Amino acid sequence: MALPKKRTYTIDDIYALPEGQRAELFDGQMYMMAPPNRIHQELVNRLCQRITNHIDSKGSSCKVYPAPFAVFLTEDDTNYVEPDISVICDKNKLTDKGCDGAPDWIIEIVSPSSSKRDYLTKSTKYEAAGVREYWIVDPDKQRITIYRYEVEAAPMIAGFEQPIQSGIFSDLEITIADLLK
């Protein structure tokens, strides 16, 4: 007896979801997204503010987009993500639908339901797509895992009390604990 064939989902399936329901696609497999909690949203808001203020003060053309913001990592229609924060410095990647290609910097705030995807699946996908820097901010563990794919093979890990220098903006330093005060 043959096993039932696993369904392959596409971006069309994402756009067919009921209003307000969010999901991501990895190689045709759909993963539903739970609503974020208060700390998650506060971190997204504060990080966006901090990064945007820095970009504006430097006159940079980079743009910061919080979720929900569509990122089409590859040209196929079986991969689709909505990172918590996307920083895009190549305006040619921006369309009315979102970002076609890899953002320069992605930040994900870990939720209990997304931990495995944030640490494993997304890291692999983001590196393969050409993301330059990826931060995983984990409120439960009070730590940040930083991948700088262009320059380092291994990630760095820092606590919320430690200042972290951005690899994308060498003069931007962020201490997560300061954002939560």
Image: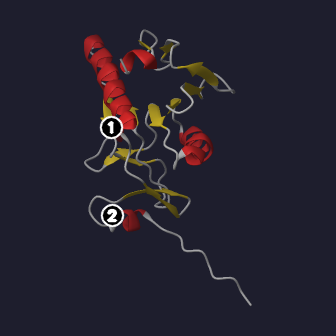
> In screen coordinates, is 28 left or right of 17?
right
Disc number for residue 15: 2
Q: Position of residue 24 (x, y in %)?
A: 45, 55
Q: Amino acid at mark 1?
A: Pro
> In screen coordinates, is 165 left or right of 35?
right
Q: Earlier in the sequence, mark 2 or mark 1?
A: 2
Element under disc 1 = strand
Number of residues whose C-alpha sits closer than 10 Å to that of mark 2, classed few (under 14), some (14–19) or many (20 or more):
few
Element under disc 2 = helix
Compared with 107, 96 (above or below) is below
Residue sitting at x 44%, y 20%: 176
Front label number (2 vs 1) = 1
Number of residues whose C-alpha sits closer than 10 Å to that of mark 1, classed few (under 14), some (14–19) or many (20 or more):
some
> In screen coordinates, is 54 left or right of 156?
left
Q: Amino acid at mark 2?
A: Tyr
Compared with 54, 71 (above or below) is below
Q: Marks 2 and 1, Cα distance to the nearest angstrom?
A: 19 Å
Residue sitting at x 33%, y 19%: 50
Q: Nearer the viewer, residue 91 or 173?
A: 173
Q: In the rendered image, which residue does mark 1 sit on?
A: 66
